[in-house]
């Protein structure tokens, strides 16, 4: 055999060896079923976290009636969690990028259980607010770690599909836990705090099943060191953050205002929990429909349609005179939100450079939960003018008109 033949054989062997090593690396990077299940189980704990105590709000207001400003402070017990999520999420993003997704997720799950259950044992409204803020820090870490992990694992249609599953499971968490919270609140307003203990069950799986992927292996666009590409992506990113904020601002009228609207219709805490869960139930349908709709519709059209659906649902709620009509409106609005969140998440995931993915996705978490926190504060003046039903109706009309008018702008982001 000649030297050239030896060289050719060596080249072929090197090529085959490199291909084999690449295949092995790709196989090891593929998440196991347990790992995927762990991430989706963690997602179930996120969106519903602040709202678990929504059925307890009327009773809580009676318990703390002698506290100055109790009417506002009791609502803050629910929404301060959202504020803490919004503030802490950017720091969670930095931790996810610098230390890793797995350590962030595990630590956040532990804090979630401790801070959540602590609410059952405190009797002072001020201390309760502190525990709720710590719960928010935990949720911000969980959401950021989950989104970053999913976008590390997948790209293309698989990423869209799994982000849809993430939102579906987040909504399923509401379907499961909110009615349970309503039933528990009917016997004792503190009992729903035990629901947060579910996080402790996921911790062992996060420790054993998840593998930390090196940051350099993550897929995503590469941003030049000179930063020249950054303004081009950060403009659309800021627009997506704003959209998430506005959609959530309107959507979070459900857990913050519906308990009082339904009380006017003569319903109890158990019914309140079940009715609010209708929103999350239809969100599951929207999230599961997202991958197929995303393949057919442009992102701008899908975004405008999801906002218009939320608005249409809120118009139905605002004009309702029965609980059944309220549920119908919630089903329509929830479907719209189920489409909106994974759509925004996917767009950000596609824009985010791999090295900045955790931080950029954490901005979406901030937008969502700042919208939750500010919702009762922004809506309260409208309620004073029009009543709770009128606030839903006018907000819904603004969403529908805004979706139509803003469609040309949406095409740019």
Image (spheres, rainbow, N blue to C red):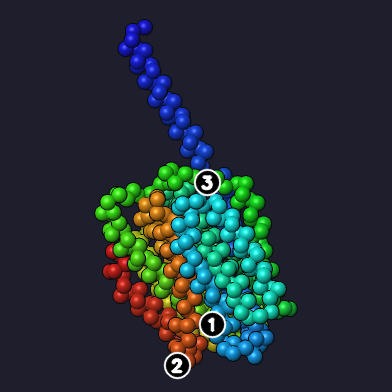
Residue extending farthest to the top is 1
393 vs 1: above or below: below
| Residue designated by label 3 | 212
**Residue drawn at x 62%, y 46% as measured from the top left:** 208
Question: What number is the disc on residue 96?
Answer: none
**Is residue 82 toward the left or the right of residue 67 in the image?**
left
**Is residue 401 toward the left or the right of residue 56 in the image?**
left
> Who comes first in sequence, dot 1 or dot 2?
1
Residue 255 drawn at (x, y percent):
55, 77
| Residue designated by label 2 | 385
Q: Nearer the viewer, residue 55 or 406?
A: 55
Q: Nearer the viewer, residue 326 or 95?
A: 95
Q: Nearer the viewer, mark 3 or mark 1?
A: 3
**Residue drawn at x 43%, y 43% as measured from the top left:** 217
Determine the CA span between mark 1 and mark 2.
15 Å
Task: Quarter of the image for the C terminus: give it.
Answer: bottom left
Residue 308 drawn at (x, y percent):
40, 73
Q: Quadrant of residue 198?
A: bottom right
**Is residue 174 toward the left or the right of residue 9 in the image?**
right
| Residue designated by label 1 | 257
Determine the CA span between mark 3 and mark 2.
52 Å
Residue extending farthest to the bottom is 385
Residue 36 drawn at (x, y percent):
56, 50
Determine the CA span between mark 3 and mark 1.
41 Å
Asked if the residue under mark 2 is in contact with the one under mark 1, i.e. CB atoms within 8 Å, the reply is no
**Residue drawn at x 55%, y 85% as measured from the top left:** 72
147 vs 340: above or below: above
């Amino acid at each position: 055999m000649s030297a050239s033949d030896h060289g050719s054989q060596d080249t072929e062997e090197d090529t085959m060896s490199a291909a084999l090593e690449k295949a092995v690396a790709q196989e090891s990077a593929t998440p196991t079923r347990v790992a995927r299940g762990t991430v989706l189980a963690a997602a179930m704990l996120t969106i519903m976290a602040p709202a678990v105590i929504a059925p307890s709000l009327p009773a809580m207001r009676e318990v703390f009636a002698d506290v100055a400003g109790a009417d506002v402070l009791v609502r803050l017990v629910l929404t301060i969690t959202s504020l803490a999520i919004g503030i802490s999420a950017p720091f969670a993003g930095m931790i996810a990028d610098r230390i890793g997704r797995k350590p962030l997720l595990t630590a956040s799950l532990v804090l979630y259980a401790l801070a959540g259950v602590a609410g059952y044992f405190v009797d002072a409204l001020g201390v309760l607010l502190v525990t709720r803020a710590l719960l928010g820090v935990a949720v911000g870490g969980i959401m950021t770690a989950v989104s970053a992990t999913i976008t590390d694992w997948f790209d293309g249609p698989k990423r869209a599909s799994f982000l849809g599953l993430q939102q579906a499971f987040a909504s399923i968490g509401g379907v499961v836990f909110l009615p349970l919270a309503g039933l528990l609140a009917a016997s004792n307003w503190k009992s729903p705090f035990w629901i947060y203990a579910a996080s402790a069950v996921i911790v062992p799986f996060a420790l054993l099943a998840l593998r930390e992927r090196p940051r350099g292996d993550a897929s995503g666009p590469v941003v030049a060191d000179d930063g020249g590409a950054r303004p081009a992506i950060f403009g659309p990113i800021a627009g997506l953050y704003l959209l998430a904020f506005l959609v959530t601002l309107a959507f979070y009228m459900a857990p913050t205002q519906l308990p009082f609207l339904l009380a006017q219709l003569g319903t109890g805490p158990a019914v309140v929990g079940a009715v609010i869960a209708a929103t999350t139930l239809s969100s599951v349908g929207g999230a599961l429909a997202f991958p197929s709709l995303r393949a057919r519709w442009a992102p701008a059209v899908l975004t405008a349609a999801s906002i218009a659906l939320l608005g249409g649902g809120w118009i139905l709620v605002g004009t309702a005179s029965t609980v059944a009509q309220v549920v119908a409106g919630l089903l329509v609005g929830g479907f719209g939100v189920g489409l909106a969140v994974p759509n925004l998440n996917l767009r950000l995931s596609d824009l985010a450079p791999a090295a900045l993915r955790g931080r950029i996705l954490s901005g979406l978490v901030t937008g969502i939960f700042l919208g939750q926190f500010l919702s009762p504060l922004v809506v309260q003046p409208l309620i004073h003018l029009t009543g709770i039903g009128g606030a839903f109706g006018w907000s819904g009309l603004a969403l529908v008109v805004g979706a139509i008018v803003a469609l040309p702008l949406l095409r740019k982001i």
